[in-house]
Image: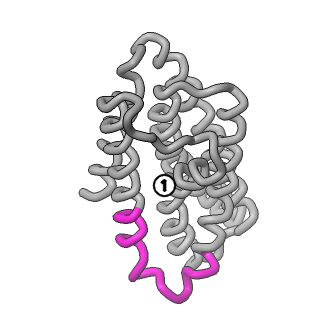
Amino acid sequence: MESMSASAGQMLTILIMAFALGMDAFSLGIGIGLKGVRKLDILKLSSVIGLFHVLMPLAGMVTGYYVSSLLGGVATSAAGALLLLLGGHMVYSSLRGEAVQSINHRTFWGMLVFAMSVSVDSFSVGVSLGMFASHILVTVLTFGISGGFMSVLGLMLGRRISGKLGGYGEAFGGVILFAFGILFLI
């Protein structure tokens, strides 16, 4: 009975962590959705984010034994800096119009940049989890499903709102990403 209670507690902890990590994907999804996004792009981007939410904590768990105390703050700072750059670039390009090329979330590299920006903190969580005896497959699959689902929700919400904001959607999305970048760095 005691092991079942511990297992349920561990699963609840994993679900809460997956939700918290998925919130980054949700907020990023709103920002990208405000730029305007097609349903096929939502599927592709959410799939890549979900995949990164599996691979990054898995890599973190493998690395966890060696560098857990060093990497936690560095990974969060890197994610914050990346979101600051992406958000600032989106605001700048929306204010300058067509004169500045914005990062295209439809390209392979654009998807990787966006997926990496919300998955870096999953790596640091994986580093921490690597120190404990948690079920690796259940953990990374829960993180991946949560990250992918939360990004779909954010992208769909941003897409719906963007029609109401018109040309200011990209700037507003950039401000959201920029704000989350600042929160990561604080």
SS assignment for the magenta stretch, majority: helix
Q: Residue furthest left?
A: 186
Q: Position of residue 11 (x, y in %)?
A: 64, 56
Q: Residue 48 in magenta?
A: no
Q: Position of residue 147 (x, y in %)?
A: 61, 46
Residue stretch rendered in magenta on the structure: 61-78
Q: Residue furthest bottom?
A: 66
Kind of residue at disc 1:
Ser
Q: Looking at the picture, tell me which residue is in the foreground, 52 or 125.
A: 52
Q: Is residue 77 above or below residue 159?
A: below
Q: Residue furthest top?
A: 164
Q: Position of residue 94 (x, y in %)?
A: 36, 30
For the point 54% across and 57% down, which residue is it?
Answer: 116
> Which colour style is shown?
one colour
For the point 59% across and 27% down, which residue is it?
Answer: 37
Q: Looking at the picture, tell me which residue is in the foreground, 105 or 63.
A: 105
Question: Which residue is identified by label 1?
Answer: 117
Q: Is residue 159 above or below residue 93?
A: above
Q: Position of residue 132 (x, y in %)?
A: 58, 76
For the point 52% across and 36% down, which residue is it?
Answer: 29
For the point 47% across and 46% down, which residue is it?
Answer: 24
Q: Looking at the picture, tell me which residue is in the foreground, 132 or 30.
A: 30
